[in-house]
Amino acid sequence: MSNFIIPNLQKEKIESYLKEGKRLDGRKAEEYRELFVEDGVSENSASAVRVRFGKTEVLAGVHLALAVPYPDSPDSGTFMTSAELHPMASQQFDIGRPGINSVELARVIDRGIRESGFIDMKKLCIKEGEKVYQVFVDIVAINDDGNLLDVAGLAALIALGRARMPIYNEEEDKIEGYSETEKIPLENDVLSFSMTFHKVGNVIVADVGHEEEAISKFRLTVAMGDNGGVPRITAMQKGKAGTISSDDMETILKLAESKWAEMFPKVKEYVFK
C-alpha cells in the first residue's frame, strides 16, 4: 500500500538477506508477525476491535443501519466497507477524501467477504422490497508498518464475527442500540481470510514490512476459505506493476495453501470467539 521510497543501499541489503533466506527483522520469507487482538474498543457500535501484526495496527468497527434493498435483491440486506488511511498511520497518506490506496483496500476486503457469502444477507431482511439492514464495516489505519491489506482484512472479519444485531423499534422505525446476546447472521462454514504475498528481489514474501513493501515488484492477495478441510479460493487481487510469471503463481498458491492450513484454526478462533 506504500509509496515509500528507500535508498538503493537499503534495497540491496534487504534483497541480499532474502537470498540467504533471512529478513532484517529476523523472520523467514514466509513467516507472519505475531497477531494481537483487542476487543470492545467502542461500546457504541455493533462491535469494534483493534488488530495488530507487529507494528501495523488497525481499528475495525461494525454498525448497522436501516436501508431500502436493491431492486435485484429485494429480500436481502446490503453490505459496505470503507477504509480511512490517515497521516497518523503513515506520512504517505494525505488528509482529505479517500485516495486510491484506501479505495483499493476497502474494495479488496469487501470482495473477499462478499464473494465468500460470509454474511447471510437474507436474514437481514425486515420487510421484503421495503426495508433491510445495511451492514457497514469501517476500517481505520492506526499505524502502517507494512501489509495493511491482511491486517485490515482480518480486523474486518473479527469485527463481523463479534457484531451484535440491532434492536429495531418497528413502531418508531428506528434502531435503539444493539442486542447483548444476538449476533448478526453469518455463514460460519464459509469463513474466508486474505493473505497477501509480494515479490521482493527474486523471493516471494508473506506479511511484508514497510520497506519490503516499498521495493516489491508486485503483490497478490488471495482470499481462501474452507472446503471440507481443503482451501478454496474465494477472491484474488493483484497490485503493483510487476508481471507474475507462471512459476511465481505456482509458488504463491503453494505458499498460500500452506499458510492457510497453519493460520485458519487461529483465525477461526478469533472470529468466532
Image (tube, rainbow, N blue to C red):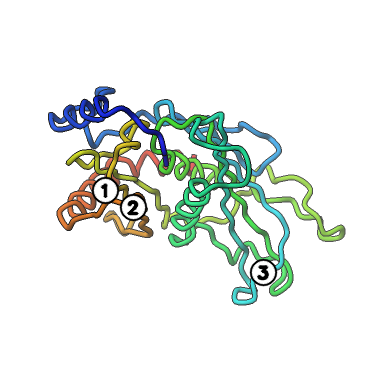
The picture places residue 76, in percent across and down from the top left corner, at 61, 68
The picture places residue 202, in percent across and down from the top left corner, at 17, 41
CA gap between label 2 and label 1 equals: 7 Å
Q: What numbered label is drawn on residue 256? A: 1
What kind of element bears circle 3?
Answer: loop
Left or right placement of residue 199 versus residue 128 in this view: left
159 vs 3, nearest the viewer:
3
Q: What numbered label is drawn on residue 69? A: 3
Residue at the spot 37% in from the left edge and 38% down from the top edge: 266
Question: Does the CB distance between marks 2 and 1 fall below 8 Å?
Answer: yes
Tell me the residue that label 2 is attached to.
222
For this orientation, the residue located farthest to the front is 8
Q: Is residue 243 above or below residue 6?
A: below
CA gap between label 1 and label 3 equals: 36 Å
**Earlier residue among tags 2 and 1:** 2
**Earlier residue among tags 1 and 3:** 3
Q: What numbered label is drawn on residue 232? A: none
What kind of element bears circle 1?
Answer: helix
Q: Is residue 212 above or below residue 234?
A: above
Tag 2: amino acid? Val
Density class for disc 2 (Cα within 10 Å; few <14, some 14-19, many ≥20) is many
For this orientation, the residue located farthest to the bottom is 72
Residue at the spot 54% in from the left edge and 47% down from the top edge: 99
